[in-house]
Image (cartoon, rainbow, N blue to C red):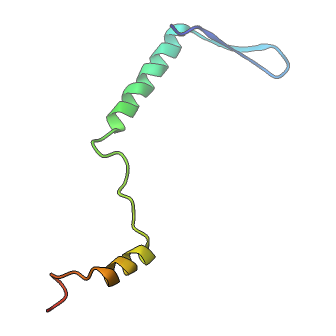
Amino acid sequence: MIYEVKIIKPDGSLKEVISSERLEKMYWDTFYKNEDNIGLVTAPKAQVPSWVKQRLDLNYPDPVNSGS
């Protein structure tokens, strides 16, 4: 359950009252928008630092591209 929200100005007077229906609509609109943006893979692939790649290339040369 979502309750209405009263927004008060710095001087203490009432600025706005947001109804529970409006808050509920805002919540579900945001929820569905965020759900649409989620894919199967949401996180980008982590990049291997260059020093790690260089060390791995020295220790484990690629047999396909080594030319031997």
Image spot of residue 54 (x, y percent): 38, 80
- Considering only vertical position in the picture, is 9 above or below 59? above
Image spot of residue 44 (x, y percent): 37, 54
Residue for point 25% across, 83% down? 61
Image spot of residue 42 (x, y percent): 35, 45
Residue for point 37% across, 75% down? 53
Image spot of residue 16 (x, y percent): 68, 15
Task: Give the quarter of the figure containing the C terminus.
Answer: bottom left
Return the residue found at the far bottom: 68
Give the number of marks: 0
User: Would you identify the image quadrant in which residue 63 lies?
Assistant: bottom left
- Considering only vertical position in the picture, is 43 above or below 65? above
- Considering only vertical position in the picture, is 47 above or below 24? below
**In the rendered view, does 19 fall on the left or right side of 50?**
right
Instruction: Please tell me which residue lies in front, 14 or 53.
Output: 53
Instruction: Please tell me which residue lies in front, 22 or 43.
Output: 43
Residue for point 44% across, 27% down? 30
**In the rendered view, does 57 fall on the left or right side of 66?**
right
User: Would you identify the image quadrant in which residue 48 lies?
Assistant: bottom left
User: Would you identify the image quadrant in which residue 9 lies?
Assistant: top right
Return the residue found at the far right: 11
Instruction: Please tell me which residue lies in front, 36 or 7.
Output: 36
Return the residue found at the far front: 59
